[in-house]
Image (cartoon, helix red, strand yellow):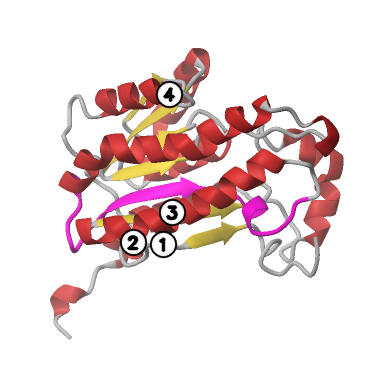
Amino acid sequence: MADSQFTTHADLFDLSGKYALVTGGTKGIGMMIARGLLQAGARVVISSRDVDACAKAQHLLSEFGDVQAIPADLSEYSECRRLADLVTADSERLDILVNNAGAMWREPLETFPAEAWDAVVDINLKAPFWLVQALLPALRKAGTADDPARVVNIGSIAAIHVAESPNYSYAGSKAALHQLTRVLARELGPQHITVNAVAPGPFPSQMMASTLDAIGDRITAKAPLRRLGRDDDMAGVAVFLASRAGSYLTGSIIPVDGGIATTATGT
């Protein structure tokens, strides 16, 4: 085997010179991922519909690298296109797209409203597709056979096993996102773009706050690793998928959940 096929440990996870977009990057899992990409050397754009949250997150993340925040409501098709135009305004290339922006709606079956489907599906399922569609030329320009461009969709273990809380549109939308990941991986692989999904388990975040307050101890007790996710757990898998280390992986759904979904014996 030729020496040129070996990569140094430092280079294996190095993202220097890479350009990334992380949607929903102003808090929770999105901020964990943005921080990890920045620390690995990437230039990162984060987005959120909340203008104040964008400003605050950009300030907090700036200590780790070159970061820009762009407010956008990705539940709207026109906003996805606008964000894509702004992200590519000073660069024709986009190396990494992380579709993390999401929404959840918990309500019992008997009262689960119609609007809970549109509100959740628009942001959890349609927006990732719209952004891939809008940013495809930039992803194609960035990818090569040896170093593909990367799309990372943030799914959920709620799409792998049945959660205790009534989250019908959330679980359904994330399961659909997992399958969309596989469909896009097959189509875009020959174009030098990998498409993978991360399925997080319980991580401390605003979205998970009420669940963790109510049953956090029970969730932790059921996890084989007996703990919640930490910032580095999510940053690490994102850097892996975005770096040389993950360049031969596509169409995969990676649970990052301490073993909760993958070892479950029941619901």
Which quarter of the figure has residue 120?
top right
Q: Which mark is residue 227?
A: none
Mark 1 residue type: Gly
Mark 4 residue type: Gln
Which quarter of the figure has residue 77?
top left
Foreground tag (1 vs 4): 1
Residue to which mark 2 is pinned = 186
Residue at 29% of width from left, 61% of height from top? 244
**Label 2 with label 1: CB-CB less than 8 Å:** yes
- At label 4, counting other C-alpha atoms closer than 10 Å, the crowd grade (few under 14, some 14-19, many 20 or more) is many
Question: Residues in magenta?
Answer: 142-163
Residue to which mark 1 is pinned = 251
**Label 1 with label 4: CB-CB less than 8 Å:** no
Q: Which numbered disc, 1 or 4, marks the residue that appears first in the sequence?
A: 4
Q: Can residue 21 be seen here?
A: no
In 3D space, how far apart are the residues under numbered discs 1 and 3 (Cα atoms)? 6 Å
Q: Which numbered disc, 3 or 4, marks the residue that appears first in the sequence?
A: 4
Residue at 45% of width from left, 63% of height from top? 252
Horizontal and vertical percent position of residue 164: 81, 49
Which quarter of the figure has residue 108?
top right
Residue to which mark 3 is pinned = 181
In 3D space, how far apart are the residues under numbered discs 2 and 1 (Cα atoms)? 7 Å
Secondary-structure class at tag 3 = helix
52 or 182, nearer to the observer: 182
Residue to which mark 4 is pinned = 58
**Label 1 with label 3: CB-CB less than 8 Å:** yes
